Amino acid sequence: MEPHEHAVLSGQYGASLSRREALAVELAERIAGDPHSVTDDFWRDLKTEFSDEELVELIFACGIFNWGNKFNITMRLDTDGAAYPRGMRYKDAPTSWRRTAKA
């Protein structure tokens, strides 16, 4: 991990990011943690840097990535490892990862 990536992930991104970038990262963190934390004051800050269209795109992207993360965690997919084997089918997954249907 690069030093600036570590800084961003540890919340110390003040000097490494522009105000616009820092607000986008904070928005992503708030959406992932508690969407109710996007307060009116924070929204006003966002509006100083982003258009309505840009905010829609940012919020949509955050939602898609959050959904993908939850899906991968639930399915226990190793997204940090090597590429998945070709041709792997659901039935090939370890049984501890899937429910067996009751007849």
Image: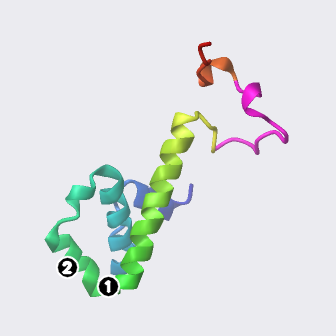
Stretch in magenta: 80-93
Q: Residue shown at 49%/59% (left/top)? A: 64
Q: Which residue is mark 2?
A: 44
Q: Is residue 63 left or right of residue 82?
A: left
Q: Residues within 10 Å of mark 2 (few under 14, many from 20)?
A: few
- Quick check: is 61 in the magenta stretch? no
Q: Main secondary structure of the magenta part?
A: loop
What is the residue that sits farthest to the right in this orientation? 87
79 in relation to 55, above or below: above
Which of the image's four quarters has the C terminus?
top right
Q: Is residue 78 visible?
A: yes
| Residue closer to the observer: 58 or 18 | 58
At x 81%, y 39%, the residue is 85
Q: Evaluate whether residue 18 shows in this view.
A: no
Q: On the image, numbered disc 1 is attached to which residue?
A: 49
Report the side of 63 relative to 101 (left or right): left
The residue sitting at 21% across, 58% down in the picture is: 37
Say which amino acid is labelled 1: Glu
Q: Percent x, y for residue 11?
A: 34, 58
- Figure label count: 2
